[in-house]
Each structure stands twice: as C-alpha cells, then as structure tokens.
Amino acid sequence: MERETGHWLKRIDRAIWTPRHALLPLWKVGALRTVRLFIVLIRDLVEGNLTLWTMSLVYTTLLSMVPLLALSFSVLKAFGVHNQVEPLLQNLLAPLGEQGQEITVRLIGFIAQMNVGVLGSAGLALLIYTVVSLIQKIEESFNAIWHVTHLRSLGDRVSRYLSVLLAGPILVFSALGITAMALNSEVARYVLALEPFSTFILVAGRVMPYVLVIGAFTFLYMFVPNARVRFAPALAAGTIGGILWQSAGWAFALFVSSSTQYAAIYSSFAILVLFLIWLYVSWLILLLGAEISFYLQHPEYLYALPGEPRLSNRMRERLALAIAGLVASHFVHGRPPWTPQQLAQQLGIPMHAVDVAVDALAGSGLLVQTGADPPAYVPARDLDQLSIAELLAIVRKAGEDKFLNPDALPVSPPITDLEARIEAAVAAALDGASVRDLVAAEPGRAAGASPPG
C-alpha cells in the first residue's frame, strides 16, 4: 500500500513539475501555473520568510502607529480636515468590534495630547525616523519578495517617503471630502432618488469597500517594489488580496463577537492581543498578495524546491553562453539591446541567476550597461575580440573574493599539475573561438530571438 501511494505521489509530482510549457497547449499551461502557484504559496507560508517579515511589520507598526497618525494629523490640521482621521481609523479597526472603537478612542487621545511643536529638533527627527522606518520596512519586504538586489538611490527614497508622509494624507482625505460633498449636493440627492440610480448606488455602496481596497493594494504592488511591475499581475494580486482582506475582516469580526475566552484568559490585555492578531493577518494578506503579483509576472520562479535554486557549474557556463549569444545576436542584427528581465523571461531562468551571470560579464569588461531605463547590455568590445575561453573563465571565477579563492586553498603538487593540464586542454579546444561564433542561429530562433514584450 505504501509503495503504491509513493508511486502515485511521484507520478503527480512529475505531472506538476516536469512538463515543458513550450510543448503544452495554453489551457494546460494556465492550469499548471495555477497549481504550481497554489503549492508554492503554501510552501512559502509554511517554510519561507513570509511570516518573519509579517512579524517584523507588526512590531514596527506598533512603534510607529502613533507617530504616523500624529504627523498625518498635524498635516491635515493645517487644511481643516483632521476630523476625518478618526472615521478612517474606525473603518480599519472595524473587524475588532467594540474593542476596535476603544483602540480608536485611545489612539486619537494620544494624538490629541501629542504636541509636535514642543518636541524640539531632536524629538521631531526621532518622530520622523520612527515613521520612515515603517515605510522602509514595507519597501524592504516587497523588495525581498521581488528578489530585488539593487535598491533605490537615497535621494529617490527620501523623496518618495516625504511624498507619502506629507502629500499622501492630503490627497486621500481631499478625495474623500470631495466625494462626500458631491453626494450631499442637491443635484446628487435628486438623482439618487430616481430609479435605477438608487438601486445602483445601493449596490455600489456594498461593492465600493472592495473596490477601494483592491485599488489600494494594486497601487502598493505596482509602486513599492524597486522593479517594473506590470499592471495585469498587480491588478490580479490586488483583487485577490483585497477580497481576502475584506473577507478576513468579516470573519475576524465574527470571531471577536463570538469569542469570550480571550477576555477570560487575558483580561484587560485581550484588546491588545486581538489588535496584534488583526495587524498580523492584515500584513500577511498584503505580503501574500505581493508574492502572487511576483509569481504571476515571473512564472520561472515556480519551481518545486524551496529557496533560490543553485545552478551547477555546467548550468552557469551554459547560461553565460546563452546570454552572450543573445546580446551578440541583437548587436549584430541592429535590434534593441536586452535587459536582464527580458533575458530571464526569454530563457525561463530566475532573475537572480541571470543577474549573477550578467554582473560577472559586465564586471569583467565583456558587457557594458546602457544608460536606458531599465538598463540594457551590449558587447563592450568587438565580438571577435571577446574569446569564449575568457568568457568561461569569468563565469568560473564568479563569486570568488580575497578570502575564498583558489589561492586560499592549499593543495598538493599533483592537483596543481592536473589543474594546469585541464586549463591547457580547455584553452587548446577553444583556441580562436569568439563570441561572434555564437551568432550562428537564424533570426527568430534561439540566440536570435526577439525580446518578449
């Protein structure tokens, strides 16, 4: 029985992870990616860093919530719309029921008692730093999910953070105020009294919370990571995340209203415990949606084993040759240069593996980066002067440093002699071979293929 069960598990595993997409019809590709996405998301929840990032955000939120609200309150007070903070906070904490209202009253009380003007320069700087740390932590979590290795410049981050802190509250509450004024006007009241407008508004009022949350999630998924996120994956993830968040709020409200043991066990700390749980659930859903947007845009990361796959030496050499062939082919035929993201999509290889190969080739002077946004790569020298032997030697040395290199590993003379013979044999076999020899495929095939749109 166990042998038969193991046999069927292996067959299911092969059916999910082995097929090549190029050999399957589109509907099977979609079904396979959906199954793989579901499995990978569960794996990341159980074994990945998703829960660690979530707990980090919960902790940072607790530290920065009052300073963030106080700073927003101070900005909004100058425009006379500071009274809108409390209703918005009540809506966010609505799943906590009466406890949510109590937390809102206490937070508003803290904000009202905090006078930003008397903090002094050091206190104001600490206040702003506490708030900025939350935004920075969110960006770091999204970048980790998107496997981003190159962060935004310091100036870009400062400008974005200040825009969120200063202009964000003004824009949000101005939009809410304009909407409320428009709905309370005489013309709006007259139109809403007519059919089918009244029914439409009733339905829209029930759907609007989902639409607003989906829009907010989609905006975050597109603009927080330091990566070019396409609208379709961001919208799909925002829709899933928004529906999950709204549904989780409804389920959590039922849980709070029907649960009495927390008050019996934790007494006055029950409010704090429930608040922490709701923060955890909210951040977990947001980060889960970020993972969905990443996997939808980069299905090449949907593989069976956890963690980032380690390429063998043979795969690294083959990848470097493929990248050099693609770059050289477009250079020879006058096509637009390749970006790392286009290379990853074309080759079906995870982005971090492409980055390792491209960074090694660019760092050693074989490729040069263009000034475009996003940056692309072209050959740094004449193709006939770029030898295959040099290319492979660069790939083999990638990752070595002054502490971990062949010179730091003492070996016996026979091993040294064997290595020298291997190097001589490789050099003799590749004598005269250059990167131009890789541009042998016909246009539209293999190394001459066009970048995906």
Image: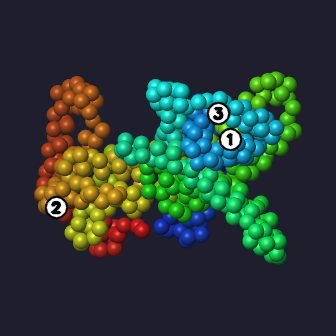
Residue 147 percent coordinates (x, y): 45, 46
Instruction: Assess disc 2: are there few (<14), some (14-19) or many (≥20) residues with their C-alpha within 10 Å of its C-alpha.
Output: some
- Circle 2 is placed at which residue position? 383
Q: Is residue 417 left or right of residue 160?
A: left
- Circle 3 is placed at which residue position? 111
Q: Which mark is residue 31?
A: none
What type is the residue that disc 2 sits on? Leu
Q: How many marks?
A: 3
Between the residue at mark 1 and the residue at mark 3, the CA separation in whole angstroms equals 25 Å
Q: Nearer the viewer, residue 391 or 344?
A: 344
Q: Which mark is residue 281?
A: 1
Residue drawn where x is 77% and y is 73% of the image: 191
Residue 224 percent coordinates (x, y): 49, 49
What type is the residue that disc 3 sits on? Ile
Q: Nearer the viewer, residue 416 or 285?
A: 285
Residue drawn where x is 77% and y is 43% of the image: 95
**Which type of secondary structure does the marked residue at label 2 adopt?**
helix
Mark 1 or 3, closer to the camera: 3
Q: Is residue 156 left or right of residue 192?
A: left
Between the residue at mark 3 and the residue at mark 2, the CA separation in whole angstroms equals 65 Å
Up-down relation of residue 423 to residue 262 (above or below): below
